[in-house]
Image (spheres, rainbow, N blue to C red):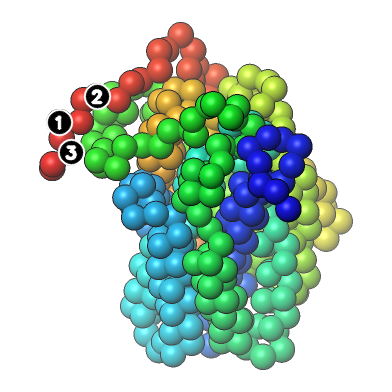
Amino acid sequence: MRLSSGKRSFHYAWIVAALTFLVLLIGAGVRATPSVLIVPLERDLHWSRATISFAISVNLLLYGLIGPFAAELMNRFGVRRVIAGSLVVVSSAVALTTRMSASWQLVLLWGVLVGCGTGMTALVLGATVVNRWFAAQRGVVMGVLTASTATGQLIFLPILAALVERHGWRSAALTIAGCAAAVIPFALLFIRERPDEVGLTAYGAQADESSPAVAPATESAVSVLRSVARTRDFWLLSASFFICGASTNGLIGTHLIPACMDHGIPEVKAAGLLAMMGIFDLIGTTSSGWLSDRFDNRYLLAWYYGLRGLSLLYLPFSFDIRFAGLSLFAVFYGLDWVATVPPTVRLTANAFGKERSSIVFGWIVAGHQLGAAMAAFAAGAIRTYLGNYTSAFLFAGLLCAMATLLVLPICRGAKKLEPEPLLASAE
């Protein structure tokens, strides 16, 4: 089959995108695993929910903080090496969790090592691949790659919950560790860094058009942060994405299954609820990518955060309607789960330029994960000391209402920030 840079014949960009989706899918499965382990660890090792939530919050925080440096490492050493290294760390650390006997080991293995490892192959990886390999359909491709979170959740959560119920939590940990290790050879054999390595231009680019630029290898993540931190748009994007993290994987992704179990819903059934959300998230995020290519991304984000806030305000009352009420929540919340990512990526590129967008987006994702980490720990502490999650869900809904106001001024009347001369590259 002939490779071509035109749209009508097969393009190697789709192979790279498919493998990236697979890597992100496995990462999503790893990140979803704690939600089915909280109660089993509480019962088996007699650790409090606050203690377990602390380890998860460390994981979420480092997952975000490593992102900008992962983008820098991808520019310096290549996407393929970064993926392989991260998967080695993740698979080893998850497997070792089956041997832990003290809570500090959970913090070290699942918090530090898995957090850093999954952070190396997270949203920044998707943004890097899209910026390098696609000149057309970028919003759609980013939407599909972002939807890997939903697909990973859809595939892994019911399986892991069933394994925990029948064979114990250690079997679930070993299963997800094996899946991460199995992807390594495919990444090493088939992922290429840029289109020119296979004699192509980016998908959708003209034959005489160069591939999308990437951040100069001499520009560090810290120097990029120092530059963009002077702008209003960076802080608006970071603050809104902070709220996104607090209201998604920090709260719902971590604590919805334990909350369901508090109301008498079995773990496998609760995991099926998250899987159902994954189905609608796949639809919502892919559609969001398509919409971000065609409409004002600020207004899209305002709608997404507003609808998510309403869903979270409804959630505490849905438990009274049992599983039917939660199913309704799963549909509306699921459509919105990570739909915020494609518009945020596009606004980042518009504000700061494609050549720096991966690193800048990495810092914005760090804000996302800071929100996720704080929400994961706070919700666990609220449950430990108040006996329920109601306050956590309601507060997250109010935060989302605030985010609708934060996103509207982004990129309004602001000029794109150009890179400074690289005088600090020797730092």
Q: Position of residue 405 (x, y in %)?
A: 54, 22
- The amino acid at mark 2 is Glu
The image quadrant that residue 401 belongs to is top right
- State the residue position of label 3: 425
At x 43%, y 79%, the residue is 92
Label 3 with label 1: CB-CB less than 8 Å: yes
Q: Are marks 2 and 1 in contact (CB under 8 Å)?
A: yes
Q: Residue at x 68, y 69 (%)?
A: 156
Q: CA distance from mark 3 to mark 1?
A: 6 Å
Label at residue 420: 2
Residue 375 in view in this figure: no
Name the side, left or right, on which 179 lies relative to 377.
right
Residue on which disc 1 sits: 423
Which is more N-terminal, label 3 or label 2? 2
Q: Which mark is residue 77?
A: none
Q: CA distance from mark 2 to mark 1?
A: 8 Å
Seen at 26% across and 38% down, the residue is 219
Secondary structure state at the residue bearing disc 2 = loop
Q: Name the amino acid, label 1.
A: Leu
Residue 31, percent across and down? 54, 64
